[in-house]
C-alpha cells in the first residue's frame, strides 16, 4: 500500500495538457473517465485546452504545450546544451502559476486522487510536470501516473539542457505516486532506468458499444472525397508525424495500384490534420505522394472529430464516418506506445496493414490478430496480401470477425473494470 493520508476516494481529478481531439492520450483518458463514472466515481479535469464538461473542468491556457511561450521555452530547452539563467527563471515563473492553479483545482473540486495523463512521462510541458511533482509532494496527494510514452522513447528528448528537470518530474520518484504504463516494454524500462515499479494496463476499446454505421449522413462521404464506386479508399487514421510512417502507406498504395490497375485504383486518406511536431514532415509526405503518383487526401475541412457543418453549409464528417467509408486501414507506424488506431480498425471491422513495431510484436500480435504485417518496409508479399483481402470478401469477413472477437476478449472495457479498482486500493480506499 502506498503511504498517503487515509481518506475515502470518490472524487478523481484528471490532469493533462489537453483534453480535446483524437490524440491517444485524450482518447484513453475518455475511456478511463467512462469506466470510473460507471464504477461510481466523480471525475474532474485540469488542462490547458479542453472541450469536455465545462462545469467540471478548470482550463488554464499556460497548461497547454502549444501555448506560444511554453512552446518557445520547450524549443530552447531541447535545442541548447546549456541553459541561460533567464530561461530557468522563465520556466519557474510558469511553473509557479500552474502550481497555484492546480492547488485551486484540488480545493475547488475536493479532489481525492489525481490521475496525471502523460504529464509525468514525456517532457512536452516541463513547467507543468514540475508544478505537479511539487504539489503531489507537498500534499502527499494520492496520484496515479498514467504514462503513455517516456522521454527515452523519443530521440528529440535525448539532447538539450533539461536533464535536471527530467530527473525531478519525468517521472517523479514520490511515495504517493502509483505508476501505470500501457505496454510491457515501458514497464521493464521504467524499472531498469528509474527503479520504479508499475503495472501495465493496455489501451482498450468499448467493444460493447454500437459503432457508427452506414447511414444517410455519411452516404455521400466517398463522393465528396472523389472516390469512384469501384475505387479503393485506404485510410491512414493518424496524425501527420514522422513516427507514423506514412511514406510506407503511400508506397503500398502506389504498388497496389500498379498491381491491380484499372478501376480498382486506390487513394489514401489521412484523417488527422494535427501537426504537433511542425509541418516539415507534412511537406515531405505531400511531395513523396506526388513522386509516387498517389492521390493523398488531407481534408481537415471535411473530416473532423465530430459531425458538423462547414462555413459553406457542407457536411463535416467524423473520424468514425471515415472508417465506415474506407475499405482498408494502413498503420505502418515505426513506434507506438500501444495503438489506438489499431483498436479502432478492429472495432470497425476493417482489414489492416500493420508495421511490426516493437510493442505490436510484444503485446498485441501474440493475442492472435490476423493482419497484413510488414517488417519495416513494403514487400511484394505485403502488397499481394492487401490485394488478396480486398479481392476476396469472404476472407475479409473472416479476418475482421476473428479480430473483433479477440479484441473484445482481451482489450475491452472489462480490463479497466477489473484493474482500476485494484489500483485505487493501493491508496487504502475504494468507493
Image: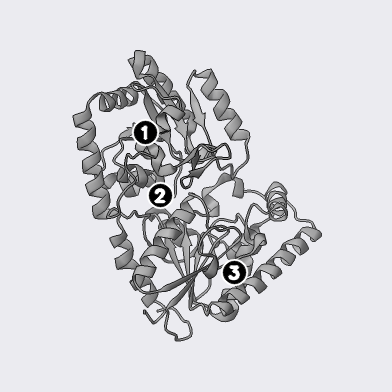
The total number of labels drawn is: 3
Check disc 3 and report its element: helix, strand or loop: helix
The quarter in which the N terminus is drawn is bottom left
Front residue of 351/179: it is 351
Check disc 1 and report its element: helix, strand or loop: loop
Residue 173 x/y as whole percent: 53, 70
Return the mark for residue 251: none
In the depicted structure, whether residue 287 falls above or below residue 406 = above
| Position of residue 7 in the picture relative to residue 405 (left or right) | right
Judged by depth in the image, the label closer to the viewer, 3 or 1, is: 1
Residue receiving disc 1: 326
Return the mark for residue 338: 2
Return the mark for residue 132: 3
The quarter in which the C terminus is drawn is bottom left
Check disc 2 and report its element: helix, strand or loop: loop
| Position of residue 7 in the picture relative to residue 35 (left or right) | right
Contact flag, marks 1 and 2 (Cβ < 8 Å): no
Whichever of callouts 3 and 2 sits on the residue coming sooner in the sequence is 3
Q: Quarter of the image holding residue 50?
A: bottom right
Amino acid at each position: 500500500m502506498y503511504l498517503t493520508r487515509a481518506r475515502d476516494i470518490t472524487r478523481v481529478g484528471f490532469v493533462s495538457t489537453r483534453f480535446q481531439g483524437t490524440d491517444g492520450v485524450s482518447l484513453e483518458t475518455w475511456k478511463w473517465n467512462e469506466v470510473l463514472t460507471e464504477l461510481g466515481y466523480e471525475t474532474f479535469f485540469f488542462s490547458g485546452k479542453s472541450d469536455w464538461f465545462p462545469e467540471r473542468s478548470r482550463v488554464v491556457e499556460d497548461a497547454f504545450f502549444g501555448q506560444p511561450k511554453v512552446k518557445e521555452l520547450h524549443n530552447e530547452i531541447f535545442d541548447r546544451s546549456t541553459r541561460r539563467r533567464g530561461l530557468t527563471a522563465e520556466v519557474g515563473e510558469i511553473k509557479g502559476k500552474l502550481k497555484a492553479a492546480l492547488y485551486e483545482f484540488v480545493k475547488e473540486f475536493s479532489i481525492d486522487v489525481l490521475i496525471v495523463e502523460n504529464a509525468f512521462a514525456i517532457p512536452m510541458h516541463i513547467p507543468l510536470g514540475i508544478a505537479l511533482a511539487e504539489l503531489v509532494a507537498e500534499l502527499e496527494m494520492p496520484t496515479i501516473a498514467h504514462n503513455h510514452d517516456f522521454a527515452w522513447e523519443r530521440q528529440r528528448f535525448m539532447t538539450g539542457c533539461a536533464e535536471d528537470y527530467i530527473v525531478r518530474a519525468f517521472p517523479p520518484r514520490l511515495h504517493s505516486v502509483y505508476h501505470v504504463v500501457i505496454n510491457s516494454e515501458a514497464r521493464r524500462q521504467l524499472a531498469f532506468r528509474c527503479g520504479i515499479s508499475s503495472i501495465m494496463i493496455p489501451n482498450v476499446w468499448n467493444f460493447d458499444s454500437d459503432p457508427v454505421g452506414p447511414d444517410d449522413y455519411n452516404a455521400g462521404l466517398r463522393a465528396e472525397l472523389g472516390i469512384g464506386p469501384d475505387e479503393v479508399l485506404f485510410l491512414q487514421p493518424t496524425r501527420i508525424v514522422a513516427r507514423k510512417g506514412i511514406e510506407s502507406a503511400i508506397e503500398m498504395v502506389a504498388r497496389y495500384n500498379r498491381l491491380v490497375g484499372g478501376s480498382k485504383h486506390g487513394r489514401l486518406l489521412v484523417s488527422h490534420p494535427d501537426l504537433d511536431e511542425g509541418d516539415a514532415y507534412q511537406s515531405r509526405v505531400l511531395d513523396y505522394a506526388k513522386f509516387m503518383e498517389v492521390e493523398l487526401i488531407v481534408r481537415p475541412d471535411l473530416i473532423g472529430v465530430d459531425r458538423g457543418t462547414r462555413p459553406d453549409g457542407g457536411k463535416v464528417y467524423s473520424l468514425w464516418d471515415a472508417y465506415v467509408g474506407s475499405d482498408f486501414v494502413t498503420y505502418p507506424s515505426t513506434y507506438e506506445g500501444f495503438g489506438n488506431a489499431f483498436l479502432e480498425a478492429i472495432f470497425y471491422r476493417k482489414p489492416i496493414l500493420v508495421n511490426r513495431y516493437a510493442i505490436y510484436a510484444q503485446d498485441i500480435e501474440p493475442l492472435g490478430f490476423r493482419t497484413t504485417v510488414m517488417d519495416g518496409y513494403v514487400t511484394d508479399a505485403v502488397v499481394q496480401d492487401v490485394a488478396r483481402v480486398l479481392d476476396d470478401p469472404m476472407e475479409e469477413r473472416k479476418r475482421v470477425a476473428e479480430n473483433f472477437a479477440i479484441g473484445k476478449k482481451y482489450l475491452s472495457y472489462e480490463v479497466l473494470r477489473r484493474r482500476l479498482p485494484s489500483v485505487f486500493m493501493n491508496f487504502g480506499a475504494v468507493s
